[in-house]
């Protein structure tokens, strides 16, 4: 008898999120549930990820009454055919909505820009927290939001020194959260919380500073937005269509970031050479973000699998944002 936990459409089809299933293997648990809940449930299972106690599992793995088998369908990050588009797939448009909000906020004052950055970090942290919850693990999403808000204020008040203060704020808030709330004291909870807090805090401070008098170029944030949106957008398109020779999401991400940064520099009459280097830095961060995604959301490095979550693309963007301000100072 093992515990089975269901999410999204599987939960709706079963009419429950948790149930006990008599079986000694993961495959037996899934087969028993499929027979009980019918063909629609079985079809949903075929495209879902399977976890046992927070770790990826195979059908032959044995289970006991103390184990929890988790099924995560495509809306929560499971695999699904690249050429199909369902109602659940509408979640894929959430990153596009975030990009539109960021572009609009960039046309407003510094206060609105900072507030929207904190909001985006909040959505990103909640998305990561959802992936952790699906694996049966804790994640202090609110600590990340507090760090981002504090870092934005530090950058606004202290200028360039606010970037360094963001490091301190991330460490203090994450550790303080673990002191106040015992469930966040475990290393496997505290470590990712500190990492995401650092990225969220540094990214927020960096982009606030990139729009301030502390950055040599007035259009620095414009270039950043053009570069990351082009790279992430093109990569998403390539992932959804049939394979194209010599093109893959990794190369498209890198080329998109660099070429978009250079094109933006030409449009705004900036230094093409300087922003070529900036684009290269953004490209490296976006690619590194893919590995970060799998480690954070899956607990292992699996670059060929899409990690669970609706805002997975923001993992690399957060890393790129975190290094953007020092990169500008170094290159410009």
Image: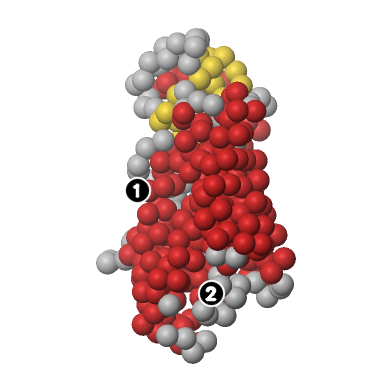
**Upstream in the sequence, badge 2 or badge 1?**
2
Q: Residue at the location (45% across, 11% down)?
A: 64
Q: CA distance from mark 2 to mark 1?
A: 37 Å
Which quadrant holds residue 332?
bottom left
Closer to the camera in the image, 183 or 259: 183
Q: Residue at the location (53% across, 39% down)?
A: 193
Q: x and y percent of residue 312 in the render? A: 50, 50
Q: x and y percent of residue 43 in the render? A: 51, 36
Closer to the camera in the image, 39 or 60: 60
Q: Are marks 2 and 1 in contact (CB under 8 Å)?
A: no
Closer to the camera in the image, 255 or 144: 144
Residue at far bottom of view: 269
Mark nearer the viewer, 2 or 1: 2
Q: Secondary structure at mark 2?
A: loop
Which quadrant holds residue 219?
bottom right
Residue 259 shows up from this direction: no
Count of number-bearing discs: 2
**Residue indicated by mark 2:** 215
Residue at far left of view: 246
Which quadrant holds residue 184?
top right
**Residue indicated by mark 1:** 304
């Amino acid at each position: 008898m093992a515990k089975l936990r269901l999410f999204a459409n599987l939960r709706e089809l079963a009419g429950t999120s948790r149930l006990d299933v008599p079986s000694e293997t993961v495959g037996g648990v899934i087969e028993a549930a499929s027979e009980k809940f019918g063909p629609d449930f079985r079809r949903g299972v075929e495209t879902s990820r399977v976890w046992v106690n927070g770790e990826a599992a195979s059908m032959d793995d044995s289970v006991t009454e103390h184990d929890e088998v988790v099924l995560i369908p495509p809306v929560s990050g499971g695999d699904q055919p690249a050429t199909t588009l369902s109602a659940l797939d509408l979640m894929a448009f959430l990153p596009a909505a975030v990009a539109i909000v960021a572009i609009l906020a960039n046309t407003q004052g510094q206060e609105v820009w900072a507030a929207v950055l904190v909001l985006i970090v909040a959505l990103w942290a909640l998305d990561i927290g959802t992936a952790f919850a699906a694996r049966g693990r804790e994640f202090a999403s609110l600590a990340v939001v507090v760090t981002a808000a504090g870092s934005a204020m530090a950058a606004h008040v202290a200028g360039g020194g606010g970037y360094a203060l963001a490091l301190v704020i991330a460490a203090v808030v994450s550790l303080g959260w673990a002191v106040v709330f015992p469930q966040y004291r475990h290393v496997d909870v505290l470590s990712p919380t500190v990492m995401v807090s650092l990225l969220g805090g540094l990214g927020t401070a960096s982009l606030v500073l990139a729009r301030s008098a502390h950055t040599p170029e007035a259009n620095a944030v414009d270039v950043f937005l053009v570069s990351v949106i082009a790279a992430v957008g093109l990569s998403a398109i390539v992932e959804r269509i049939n394979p194209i020779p010599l093109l893959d999401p990794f190369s498209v991400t890198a080329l998109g970031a660099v070429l978009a940064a250079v094109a933006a520099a030409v449009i705004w009459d900036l230094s093409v050479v300087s922003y070529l280097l900036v684009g290269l830095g953004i490209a490296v961060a976006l690619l590194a973000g893919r590995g970060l995604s799998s480690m954070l959301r899956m607990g292992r490095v699996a670059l060929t699998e899409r990690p669970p979550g609706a805002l997975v693309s923001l993992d690399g963007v957060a890393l790129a944002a975190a290094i953007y301000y020092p990169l500008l100072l170094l290159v410009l």
